Amino acid sequence: MSELSLVISIMAVLAALAGVWLISDSVSKIKAHTESLVETHIKTFQAKITETNSKLQSMTNKVGAIEAMAQSQKQEVLNQISEIEKNLQHMSGELKDLSQALPHDPRRPATMRPQRPPHST
């Protein structure tokens, strides 16, 4: 009977070792699969981050170009306004000169009549 108990004990130990090995192997496989999934997700997120950064850089470049173009157009408009103001002053001076050169016409409004110095007697 002691031999039978010894054989049963050895079989029980071997069965326990086989169970530990199966559990350990399953845990290793689960760990490897989980690590693989994590790496895949990390790579996917890194690719999305890179793509998003690229799009952001592209948009930043476009905004910079638009701002530069707007600044250029603003300066162009300011230059045109300055030129118009100069032309207006010049034409106002010419109009004044022409108005003073015209003979006196009582039908013209007083603001359009030439300014003559008072007569001295």
Image: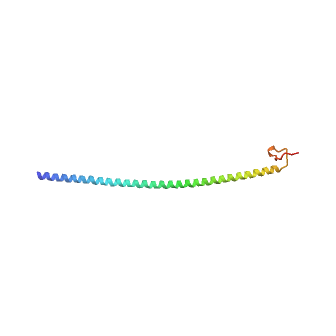
Figure disc tally: 0
- When asked about the image quadrant of residue 62, the answer is bottom right
Q: Residue at x 71, y 52 (%)?
A: 86
Q: Nearer the viewer, residue 41 or 19?
A: 41
Quarter of the rendering occupied by the C terminus: top right
Q: Quadrant of residue 66?
A: bottom right
Q: Position of residue 81 (x, y in %)?
A: 68, 51
Of all residues, the one furthest to the left in this rendering is 1
- Name the foreground residue: 71 vs 45: 71
Q: How is the image coloured?
A: rainbow
Q: Who is closer to the viewer here, 104 or 4?
A: 104
Q: Residue extending furthest front?
A: 121
Question: Is 89 placed left or right of 32 in the picture?
Answer: right
Residue 102, position in %: x, y?
83, 50
Across and down, in percent, residue 28 comes to 30, 54
Where is residue 107? Give x, y as percent. 84, 44
Q: Residue at x 26, y 53 (%)?
A: 22
Q: Residue furthest right?
A: 121
**Left or right position of 4 against 115:** left
Q: Residue at x 28, y 54 (%)?
A: 25
| Left-right relation of 48 to 116 | left
Tell me the residue at 80%/51% (across/down).
98
